[in-house]
Image (cartoon, helix red, strand yellow):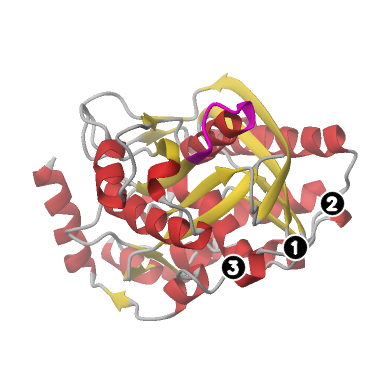
Amino acid sequence: MAGIVGYGSYIPRNRIKTEEIARQWGKDPEAISRGLMLQEKSVPGHDEDTITISVAAGRDAIARAGIDPSKIGAVYIGSESHPYAVKPSGTILIDALGIGPDVHVADFEFACKAGSEAMFVALSLVESGRVEYAMGIGADTSQGAPNDALEFSASAGGAAFIMGKNDLLVDVLETYSYTSDTPDFWRREGEFYPRHGGRFTGEPAYFKHVLNATRNILDKTGMKPADFRYVVLHMPNGKFPQQAAKKLGFTTEQMEVGWVVPTMGNTYSGSSPTGLAAILDVAEPDDLILMTSFGSGAGSDSFVYRATNLLPGRQAVGRTVRKMLDENQRYLTYGQYASMREKIIVND
């Protein structure tokens, strides 16, 4: 069997409150916060992008795995916001982390499920015996146009996972993917901000794929919602994953630990992977965990995980998601936030 031998995450310390954005555009802060179930979101600093987030998360993943990074035979970074249109993010990461040069590297894209896509391929390569270790990363500095609904949620952060066959922290018991051509969200070449289909992004896109992927992996494994200690679903806002979980038969208690979106926002490709990292920070041996991602366009990847007895001994080796969310925040005014966004646009 193959599974996770190391994991790590990173969330920028900069934050902006939902009410700060709402006031800028003359909207009701309480109505926005209540409607989206969001309090604040992370904001990348001038020196932070998908690559730096991936490097920080990958460094903790290597530390938790306790392996020689040169043994990692494949590295895949899934993101909607790779800094370069033509130049891979992964080549910079491997030099920063001491991986390679004997390594296969690729940048992945599939909207918000590019991270789980990278994890799936990394896992599959290890299962095939092609490489001893492979790293899959989901990271983003998400884009949301000013005064668009996405501006309240689009944030920054990510998580990295090293797959292997020995000294597993987490067994991967099963995977399942559900995909269709559903054009709910897109960004054409040369456009800085993505566009979306408004309410169309809900029922025919998010809910259809998340519900079907999750139900099908439950059927495939013969498991039921009550079997799981934890569940994490992609978090475009606070409300959607809670509604989907209720339809699937999961409880609020099962969702709570991985439901990091209210104080982090939607990190796009890093959303469900970071929720999974938050769960692994506290999971105990034999806990069953279900993760289902979602990417517009559209598709979902589902995974069933089981924590091993090695996990508790590695949890304190790296940074925890909750500590990054709850400590050392730096709150921005809308002007400061806009300045950072303008800096990113100019650099592009």
The residue to which callout 2 is attached is 225
Please tell me the numbered disc located at residue 254: 1
Vertical relation: 103 (above or below) 229: above
Contact between marks 2 and 1 (CB within 8 A): the answer is yes
Quarter of the image containing the N terminus?
Answer: top right
Residue at (68%, 42%) from the top-left corner?
A: 303
| Residues at marks 2 and 1, CA–CA distance in whole angstroms | 9 Å
Residue at (51%, 47%) from the top-left corner?
A: 162
Q: Amino acid at mark 1?
A: Gln
Dot 2 surroundings within 10 Å: few (below 14), some, or many (20 or more)? Answer: some
Residue at (26%, 32%) from the top-left corner?
A: 88
The numbered mark, 2 or 3, whose residue comes first in the sequence reads: 2
Residue 144 lies in magenta, yes or no?
Answer: no
Residue at the far bottom in the pictured view: 327
Q: Quadrant of residue 288?
A: bottom right
Residue at the far top in the pictured view: 181
Is 332 on the left-hand or right-hand side of 31?
A: left
The residue to which callout 3 is attached is 281
Where is residue 122 shown, x and y percent of the image? 53, 35
Please tell me the numbered disc located at residue 142: none
Q: Amino acid at mark 2?
A: Pro
Contact between marks 1 and 3 (CB within 8 A): the answer is no
| Residues at marks 2 and 3, CA–CA distance in whole angstroms | 21 Å
Residue at (68%, 33%) from the top-left corner?
A: 208
| Residues at marks 1 and 3, CA–CA distance in whole angstroms | 15 Å
